[in-house]
Amino acid sequence: MIEGISIQVILTFTTVLFFIGLYGFLTRTHLIGILISLELMLNSEAINFVAVNKYLHPQFLQGAVFSLFILALAAAETALALAIILQVYRRTGSVDVKEVKELKY
């Protein structure tokens, strides 16, 4: 146990975070909201890696290394997504998903 917190509590918490992110990803019409929901899903999985590693093999750091890789990937994905969102905003004046669907190239 991690200072009195069981693995079930941590996995329940990260599952709830993941499904909140999934719900936001599927229901949002604003591109920034979709990006935030995706980040929430990625961060919940990073917490899962660290928690499972702490319980299964506390002497090794694979979970922490994987979570750092996920965070680096999320940072790169955010930078790329924000660049795309800025270009969409410059072309349409809006960042709604409906505007992106109607965007003519």
Image (cartoon, rainbow, N blue to C red):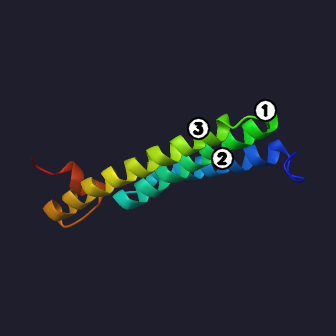
**Residue at the location (72% across, 51% down)?**
13
Residue 66's disc number: 3
Number of residues whose C-alpha sits closer than 10 Å to that of mark 3, classed few (under 14), some (14–19) or many (20 or more): some
Residue type at mark 3 is Phe
| Quadrant containing the N terminus in the rendered view | top right
Q: Residue furthest left?
A: 105
Q: Which residue type carries mark 2? A: Ile
Q: Residue at x 79, y 32 (%)?
A: 56
* Residue 80 picture location, percent across and down: 31, 50
Separation of marks 2 and 3 at Cα, in angstroms: 10 Å
* Identity of the residue furthest to the top in this view: 56
Residue where numbered disc 2 is placed: 47
Instruction: Give the residue drawn at x 29%, y 54%.
Output: 97
Residue type, label 1: His
CA distance for labels 3 and 1: 14 Å
| Residue that label 1 marks | 57
* Residue 30 seen in this snapshot: no
Upstream in sequence: badge 3 or badge 1: 1
> Is residue 19 at least partly visible in the picture?
yes
Mark toward the start of the polypeptide (2 vs 3)? 2
